Image (tube, rainbow, N blue to C red):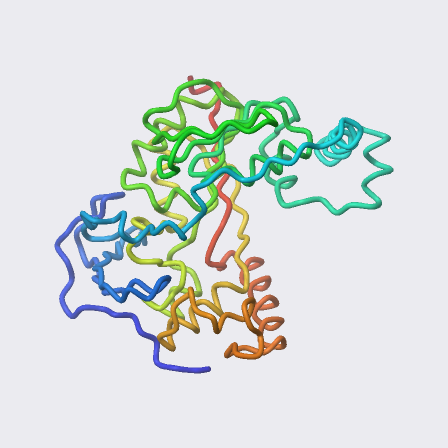
Amino acid sequence: MAAVVNLGVLPLPSPQPCRVCANTSGNARHTAREMMFGFGDTFEYIECRSCGCLQIASTPENLSRFYPDRYYGSEAIQDMAIPWRKRLAHRQLTSYWLAGRNPVGKLLSHRFSAPAFVEWATRGGVCLDSAILDVGCGTGSLLLSLARHGFSNLLGADPFIKHEIRYSSGVRVLRKHVAELDGAFDFIMLHHSFEHMPDPLPTLQKLYSLLNPDRYVLIRTPVAASFAWREYGVDWVQLDAPRHLFVHSLRSMQLLAEGAGFKVLDVVFDSTEFQFWGSEQYRCGIPLEDDRLFSADPERSMFSPDNMRQFRARAAELNALQDGDQACFYLYKDRSTE
């Protein structure tokens, strides 16, 4: 699969300043294509020589065109009623996963493996009654999963859903931008939504104001200056032009977090095999939405099951080296700085 890396670098450096650190010296320009849906439109990105942030040079006026209805479901998810005994068992189990002190949950844990949210919640100091906000949550699938596992105080926000959603489980999803939100929360999550936001610093400042002291914001986002960017350049699947307006490096995330008043207390890399198979497809001119996907039809895919196993193993190696192409950033609001 070796090939010449398509960096898409234009020959002259751009004088446009970095919108994170204001650097103007030696910033590179890259031309990337829209490849998720195969539209093929091209967009210029600036790579800051100082902080390493990749950022779109100019946000398209018609950005909504690149979020067609199929980007993610805009209708409410079916909220299945759960019998009270099952709800109680889920709550006992999740209580054990979070704190390790529930004997009933401990017994149940031998039958069930902990979902991904347990690590996020544990690192964030979350309990079942914590006030949790999920920003950019679509129609709220993660919040519904949390509700089924016993969490009781859940709110979502996404400006691109068709209307506010109220589920029978008590979960609400507001049709609002971050700037329109109010309230006080114990844990705020942004799962691959921060890179879509045009004003990262004001966004973090708003999140800081919404967060209770001694609590965390979790941001899961692609990471620039990673192996996948170095290997694939503008064919890197998580550049995702033009939807990803900012793809941050460790340095640019640190600068933004400090500028908003946060401390970055932990960074956990959680990249997957997607960085390889998605980027290899793009390198071959195959859109992400294509019936040759491995998950859609392994027989037509350009990858074998062995390829996918190798990709997963390589992703794990890169995560251990802190060189994977996405990470979880735990931003802490310290009471002592209030």
Provide residue 68's location: percent of width, then percent of height: 34, 52
The quarter of the displayed image where residue 8 is located? bottom left
Which of these two is toward me, 260 or 197? 197
Which residue is drawn at the image coordinates 63% and 41% (left, top)?
119
Which residue is drawn at the image coordinates 35% and 35% (left, top)?
159
Which of these two is toward me, 120 or 81? 81
Which of these two is toward me, 188 or 136? 136
Provide residue 233's location: percent of width, then percent of height: 34, 68
Which of these two is toward me, 140 or 193? 140
Provide residue 209's location: percent of width, then percent of height: 39, 22
The quarter of the displayed image where residue 90 is located? top right
- Does 125 appear above or below 240? above
Image check: 288 left or right of 110?
left
Image check: 254 left or right of 93?
left
Provide residue 253's location: percent of width, then percent of height: 38, 43
Which residue is drawn at the image coordinates 59% and 71% (left, top)?
308
- Does 218 appear above or below 182? below
The quarter of the displayed image where residue 171 is located? top right
Which residue is drawn at the image coordinates 23% and 56% (left, top)?
46
- Does 79 appear above or below 291? above
Q: Quadrant of the C terminus?
A: top left
Q: How many marks?
A: 0
Image check: 173 left or right of 257?
right
